[in-house]
Image: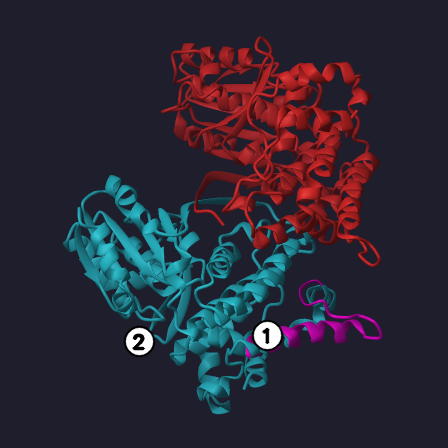
Chain colours: A red, B cyan
Amino acid sequence: MQNFMYKNPTKIIFGKNQITKLFEQIKPYGKNVLLVYGGGSIKKTGLYCSILEELEYFNVYELEGVEPNPRVTTAQKGANLVKEKNIDFILAVGGGSVIDCTKLISAASKYDGDAWDIVIGKHVPKEATPFGTVLTLSATASEMNAGSVITNLETKQKLGWGSPLVYPQFSILDPTLTFTLPRNQTVNGIVDMMSHICEQYFNEVENSDLHDAMMEGVLKQIMIYGPKCLENPKDYEARSIIMMAGTIALNGQLRWGFNGDWASHGLEHAVSAVFDIAHAEGLAMVMPNWMKFVMPNHVAKFKKFAINVFDVETSNKTDEEIALEGINKLQQFWQQIGAPTKLSERNINKEDIPTIVNSIARQIGNMQPLTKEDAAKIYEMSL
Amino acid sequence: MQNFMYKNPTKIIFGKNQITKLFEQIKPYGKNVLLVYGGGSIKKTGLYCSILEELEYFNVYELEGVEPNPRVTTAQKGANLVKEKNIDFILAVGGGSVIDCTKLISAASKYDGDAWDIVIGKHVPKEATPFGTVLTLSATASEMNAGSVITNLETKQKLGWGSPLVYPQFSILDPTLTFTLPRNQTVNGIVDMMSHICEQYFNEVENSDLHDAMMEGVLKQIMIYGPKCLENPKDYEARSIIMMAGTIALNGQLRWGFNGDWASHGLEHAVSAVFDIAHAEGLAMVMPNWMKFVMPNHVAKFKKFAINVFDVETSNKTDEEIALEGINKLQQFWQQIGAPTKLSERNINKEDIPTIVNSIARQIGNMQPLTKEDAAKIYEMSL
């Protein structure tokens, strides 16, 4: 167990009709609000109009069109808007991409240089414009953490960054807002939150038993209630549990005393920096193969995972066989709910591997650091 | 699932030697510090001297002698000190009692009336003196919540109260500070944190599956690592897990969307308002009998508890039998680690029950509201 500090000041406002709290939550910050959102699905669902009604009191400016892999150029545009319009508060309405982009807008709006400087660590934010979120897709937990992932198409990089200044002031989690999600987005959310837990479950410390137990429990519930959301998209209980699970999966409390491995995220970011695929799709393709690659060095932990999460029968099997069965069951679950589990399903082929490997930005892997050769092997296993 | 708001801004600073962070954490608040502690065990262990060294820069005033069931008179004394000495920051060093008392000092120091007004809800705090904690006993989670329980010997009442203003600014959790605890205090801590989880596990909503799964996991780990702390009080990993578990058990994140039953706490507070026994002792006596009393109306939930927490075998047993076996196993675990499980072990007898019932302050029980007659029956079962 490592020494750690933990502080997460985001206020969660959970349940039906909670957007009616927007006025009281935003008012203390001022009158000028920047509304940030994505491709316009909130206009189709009516959420856009409802939110504008709730924001009637404020001067609302808008930044539309945040990409699924949010670009640094979009965040820069938002930051410029905040400066020009003297924005007091930013409201992100969307999923992880919109929130991640808003975090960079928030920090870059108080910096005179280029937004990318913040992502690469050249500038450490000292100040940030406060923001809140209305979550429309459960997946990344960006609604209750201080991390953000940004893509730079120029440098072909997709990098994570964070600052304690970019915790949302509040996040509204209304499960009914996820009723109308396209099926594949619900699937991606499920894969994403499960992958976050797996990244933390396989970690760099010897004993994480307390948090392992919680993670095992959350994973099992996601595998029960995720499919229920797919069967009946308007199942309020199921959507609620998935929404809470997504937030809990990466709000920091599941990793007290360790960081987790995070190599699969590094591997995936390299893929989606080059190919514009959904983050969760990349994870479903890469993570089980990362597991198979590192498992022989961490058999006991993967065996525990297999038994406690997937109830793998142990009789007459070697530890490695038990461990492998758990990994296969994870991969099968993702396949069953409809996630792509091979790079080739998105037309990514053997000849693309060197380009992908080249875009791996940083040293990856905390439980087991990976070389570029290791990465190439895992991509090959994922074809 | 109910709508809810959740915000917990306390900073957790966990690990060895973290008291060296006191200076940097307190400095922003000012120079005048009130140090609040209990019966002086921190003087025996040397912690008192170490803390004074860390606080060398500050003007330190002291309030010693906070009782195990902290009295409103002590909190009033502390509040008066804060006003007289222009205290900028309060530092609580101790377990739940010291921290609970500090919370009332914090709120009452900004109020001209009687501190008891705050406990009974006659005055709602608008302001509070900021405070931090150094935890020396894992049990109540008061180090990361905004609740407090205060005893009034005059009115023979022991009441809980809370305010979002009394979250600690920070809490230092150094497992080595619990190495020297007397055995019975470690036992009491284990019972207390387990009882907090049980109070939330048995709750008023139909579906709390996600949080149930986490609670089951935490309970199981407490039952693994609690005994390890008793066997080897200097087992850092075991002390760490118990310390984190105690905080997680009642920092609010295990009860997103519900409150929990809390009748056993109401029943226990009535006992220790009249008899000056340790809170956890009262819980160990009363809670299993509360469970037996309400179980027939909630068989499915108690069956789940028995199977998921205690691995009770189900073949050839009725649901009630399975449920009862789980309750018995909880009671046996508490007995095995040395907790008293009968009121008579503390010389509380049948003739005392009417007095105890009379001191039940409020309507108790959210999953199943209890009448005073119900309470009397549960006390009788606990003799």
Q: Position of residue B170 (x, y in %)?
A: 36, 47
* B362 drawn magenta: no
Counting residues from the start of the chain, the first of labels 1 and 2 encountered is 2
Q: Which residue is at the front of the view, B40 or B371?
A: B40
Q: Secondary structure at mark 1?
A: helix
Compare residues A253 and B98 and report the one nearer the observer.
A253
Residue B267 in percent (x, y) is at: 51, 74
Residue at which label 1 appears: B333
Q: Is residue B313 a member of the stretch shown in magenta?
A: yes
B353 is higher (above) or lower (below) than A258 = below
Q: Is residue B60 visible?
A: yes
Q: Main secondary structure of the magenta part?
A: helix
The magenta segment is B308-335
Residue appearing at x 25%, y 45% in the figure: B23
Q: Which residue is mark 2?
A: B154
Q: Amino acid at mark 1?
A: Phe
Q: Residue at x 30, y 48 (%)?
A: B20
Q: Looking at the picture, which amino acid does disc 2 mark? A: Glu
In the figure, B380 relative to A178: above or below? below
